[in-house]
Image (cartoon, rainbow, N blue to C red):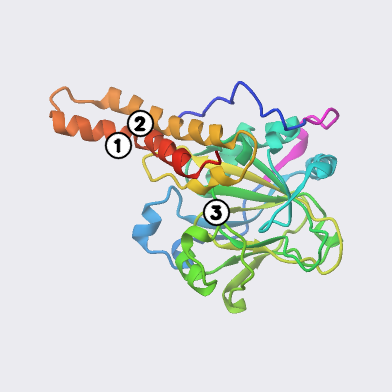
Amino acid sequence: MLANPLSPPSTHPLSYEQLRDEPLFDPKRHLSLEPPSQRWTLEDLGYTQEQARACASRVAVAGPWRLLSDQGAEAARTVALALNSFRQAGDRTASYLAGGVYRSSFLRDLCNCPQVTAFISEIAGCELLPHTMPSQQVYINYAPEDLGKAVDTWHTDSIGFDSVLLVTDPASFSGGQFQFFVGTRHEAAALLRSSPENLTAATAQDLPAQRVVSVPFPAAGYAVFQQGTMVVHRATRLERRAERNTVVIGHVSRDIALPDPTQDSIIEWGEPGIIAEFARHKAWLSRTKLDYLMRQMDLNTSAADIRTLLAEAIADARRAIDVIDTRAPQ
């Protein structure tokens, strides 16, 4: 059941300030797409075949792979530095900027570029789209001021898929490694004295070093793809104060027949417009399922089965209502 892309919202959150002077994204100059050097499947991390089949992709992590040319990496770095003054501090991610596509036309055009989407879909082995929640299409993670803090602690993501793109020369900093845990999120949660549902939050615990893989970035412009809700990952502390900027590009599966990996807790993040984005995302799922139902409905179907099919089609929208009722700040 393949969904069409969701059109961008007609309005932007008022509190996001847009850059006035930035590079214009040009795929011919700024892209340099090269396949990943290595892939890890969900089974490699210890998930069962049944668990893997419930996901849109069997790929857990892939990388490093090249996304941007030298010119593209420098342009993305320029944008990241220009947005630096808007960054926020968090418990889990020490220093970050949300709403990148609302703030920067360069970042918006990059993550919505059809060539980029098609290439990342090849890496994933399934059709992906730019995430239907625009605030999740681009995050920027910055180096923390406090060297005692990790760039990002061990966690899972609130969306299904993302690519972590380094836009700083890795030779200019020490530490700040992208790492993932070779194990399931349930194993990680037990080791971190948490629960799988709480892995999106900050943790002060660590995981056994012998079960951790570091994926080095050869240069600025390289990325790591991951199935973020299934892979427990982090970015380590820097060894000395330095610039380290990553652009995190979010994706969503085009096949919506499988369970939606987007976490309900995402609406509690407090970002401008995120509750409306969540509602649009869930409505997009239900609309696609209703369209499919109307096309495929057998007129000889029993009333009981029709009721079941309709309930399944609108379950995502009804879920959004329940989540807003119980979790949205009032």
Number of labels in the image equals 3
Residue at 79% across / 58% down in the picture? 144
Residue type at mark 2?
Lys
The first of marks 2 and 1 along the sequence is: 2
224 vs 71: above or below: below
Give x and y (percent) for residue 47: 42, 64
Does the rendering let one see residue 132? no
- Mark 2 and mark 1 residues within 8 Å of each other at the beta carbon: yes
Disc 2 crowd rating (10 Å Cα; few below 14, some 14-19, many 20+) is many
Q: Local crowd at mark 3 within 10 Å, few (<14), some, or many (≥20)? A: many
**Residue 280 in the image, given as x and y percentages of width and height:** 50, 30
Q: Are marks 3 and 1 in contact (CB under 8 Å)?
A: no
Which residue sits at x=61%, y=34%?
134
Q: Nearer the viewer, residue 53 or 314?
A: 314
Which residue matches tag 1?
312
* Residue that badge 2 annotates: 289
Identity of the residue drawn at 60% across and 21% down: 10
Q: At label 3, which amino acid type do we have?
A: Gly
N-terminal label among 3 and 1 = 3
Asked which secondary structure carries label 1, the reply is helix
Q: 169 left or right of 286? A: right
The magenta segment:
18-33
Query: Which quarter of the figure is the C terminus placed in?
Result: top right
The residue that label 3 is drawn on is 228
